[in-house]
Image: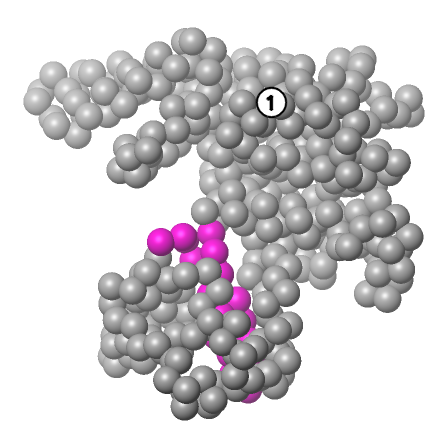
Amino acid sequence: MEAGIVGLPNVGKSTLFNALTAAGIASENYPFCTIEPNVGAVPVPDSRLATIQKYIQTQKVIPAVLQLVDIAGIVRGASEGEGLGNKFLSHIRNVDAIVHVVRCFEDDDITHVDGSVDPIRDIETIDTELMLADLESVTNSLDKARRTARSGDKDAKRRVELLEVCKTVLDDGNPVRSLNPEDPTLRKEINGLQLLTSKRVLYVANIEEDDLEGTGQHVQRVRERATQEGGEVVPVCARLEAELAELDAEDQQEMLESVGLAEPALAVLARAAYKLLGLESYFTAGEKEIRAWTIPIGATAPQAAGVIHTDFERGFIRAEVYAVDELVQYESEKAIREAGKLRVEGKDYVMQDGDVCHFLFNV
């Protein structure tokens, strides 16, 4: 699962990406286009890993990982080919969610493409370009779907219905995600159209170092906008985070304390993006490693096992499950088992965030 970082030029987008990916996990080229954005694997901080390690000695600890794509800055007119144009838009089409970096700091040395700092105008610029691109895509797809539907093709008829709903929303000047259908089947069908504005958005307010809590007027305006959309805002000082990312653990902690932060804001951002994508973690723990595995919220036990290896899902028999809090209470897996707290779950079990599991399988 991937989230794409977008924003206007000079908003701090690449600084943020570089800070996020400075954890020693190298970025790589994105394979599907000529002008290639950077892709980075970002560890998702999770204090439960350290808790498990306290009671189960292991050789290494592996956190969950979020994949981020640094997409070139969009400009007004991108939907008509300005800047990277269609190449930029195709990059967005291939990610699962959008992290939208919005400039909320004043700096005369960093020129804004529109001459002044106005985060709502910036958001609307990008939203407009994405909606115009979607409208063109929907219009073209409708013509083709209608021709196919005339033959009585049921799938084509359903596609026409969906596209017409999306076109109405876009014609009214709203992104497709504003539909927000409660029916999961309908939501999946709409997402299947791969429209740019159907993707969920997390706003990152790039702030000044003297406003690390994001109380300034610019950030408040972004929060109001996000609330209207049912979204979230994470305030981040990209410049400060870039400096923190270059320090070792001891110096980093000292710097965090000096500015009044409990942890890097990037940790909050990584967790928020993980949540935005509808993901959660479960754990496996043993002598070789303690590891967080990424699964979609609502995954069953066999599906979770399949993330480790397809054979685990194919030959799934049962899962032995306990909670991290139970490990804290009983202090060992053996004690959990002896207390009768080790749950045995079958194929219909829906995984819970933070489950610690052993899978039994046979192929």
| Magenta segment includes 288 | yes
Residue placed most toward the observer, 83 or 168: 168
Q: For the C terminus, which image quadrant?
A: bottom left
Q: Residue 174 in the image: x percent, y percent?
A: 46, 16
- What residue sits 39% from the left and 29% below the top? 180
- What residue sits 56% from the left and 27% below the top? 227
* Residue beneath disc 1: 225
Residue 29 visible? The answer is no
Residue 300 visible? The answer is yes
- What residue sits 70% from the left and 44% below the top? 17
Residue placed most toward the observer, 255 or 4: 255
Type of colouring = one colour
- What residue sits 76% from the left and 52% below the top? 264
Q: What secondary structure is marked by label 1?
A: helix
The three-letter amino acid code for the residue at tag 1 is: Arg
Q: Residue 279 in the image: x percent, y percent?
A: 47, 52
Mark 1 crowdedness (10 Å alpha carbons): few <14, some 14-19, many ≥20: some
Side of 348 where 180 appears, left or right? right
Q: Residue 105 in the image: x percent, y percent?
A: 82, 27
Prevalent SS, magenta region: strand
Residue range highlighted in magenta: 279-298
**Dividing the picture into quarters, in which one does residue 226 lie?**
top right
